[in-house]
Amino acid sequence: MKKGQPVEAIELEVQNIKEKISAMSVTAANMYLDALRSLSTHDVPLALEVIDRDKEVDRLELIIDEMCLTFLARYAPKAGELRFVVAILRLIIELERIGDHSKVMARQVVKFHLAPTLNALPEWQEISILPYQMLNEAVDTFLETNVTKYAAIIKTDETVGRLQKSLNESLVSLIRRDTTHTWPAVSLINIIRRLERIADHAKNIAELVPYCATGEVIRHRVI
């Protein structure tokens, strides 16, 4: 912190950044939910809205990036504040990629009518809601710097991986039984991969919590 800078000003800047993070995460999470909704109902206009909404995620990423750089230049932050800014710069990359994955999922709706094949997958409901829950919990945990919650979020990623494997096996079996499902099934394998990646991004956000709180880096470490 530069000499003479009031603590209240720094706290206000931090709060402003957190509010923008919250807005970006809500936008990305809603993109994901609407991509799923368009997928299950074959709502092409909604899918096109999701694709267009990615611009807002990109816009917020640039705004937050600039806010962080201004914060660094203005306040010369101490260790804890510096870790916060570094973590934010990582977090917005994760959110931007979640928006990208949701956009790609929506594009598949425009290309294919996937709802009939989707209805043949009993585990779809479970795997589709988990990344959304992980994302919301990870962002909330980060903004609260709650070091008691992040480990559970990371563990949930293992469940997503297990469900991905099971669903891929089901889709391959479906193709073998009925080749008319080939292109929808291949598209859904790609979409399920996107779900797994979104869960990974949420896990990465959760892993920023102990770093922000104490400087501990846990990425690639088994909890």
Image (tube, rainbow, N blue to C red):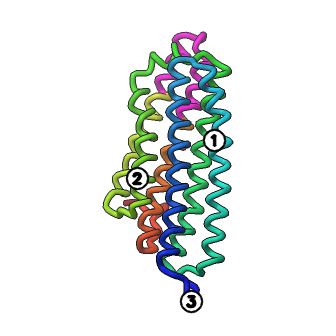
Percent position (x, y) of residue 73? 65, 77
Q: Amino acid at mark 1?
A: Asp
Q: Nearer the viewer, residue 110 or 2?
A: 2
Q: Which residues are magenta?
A: 169-192
Dividing the picture into quadrants, the one containing residue 191 is top right
Q: Amino acid at mark 3?
A: Lys
User: Of the residues tagged 2 and 3, which is closer to the observer?
Assistant: 3
**Looking at the image, is mark 2 or mark 1 earlier in the sequence?**
1
Whether 167 is drawn above or below 14: the answer is above
Instruction: Give the residue pinned by disc 2.
Output: 154
Query: How would you rate the neighbour count of disc 3 (Cα within 10 Å): few for under 14, some for 14-19, many for 20 or more?
Result: few
**Looking at the image, is mark 3 or mark 1 earlier in the sequence?**
3
Percent position (x, y) of residue 203? 46, 52
Query: How would you rate the neighbour count of disc 2 (Cα within 10 Å): few for under 14, some for 14-19, many for 20 or more?
Result: many
Q: Residue at x 39, y 49 (%)?
A: 137
Gap in angstroms between the C-alphas marked 3 and 1: 42 Å
| 181 falls in the magenta region | yes
Q: Amino acid at mark 2?
A: Ile
Instruction: Give the residue pinned by disc 1.
Output: 100
Dividing the picture into quadrants, the one containing residue 206 is bottom left
Residues at circles 2 and 1 in contact by the CB criterion of under 8 Å: no
Q: Tell which residue pokes out farthest to the bottom in this image.
A: 3
User: Of the residues tagged 3 and 1, which is closer to the observer?
Assistant: 3
- Pick the quarter of the image with the N terminus: bottom right
Q: Residue at x 55, y 57 (%)?
A: 91
Give the SS element for disc 2: helix
Q: Residue at x 44, y 72 (%)?
A: 216
- Pick the quarter of the image with the C terminus: bottom left
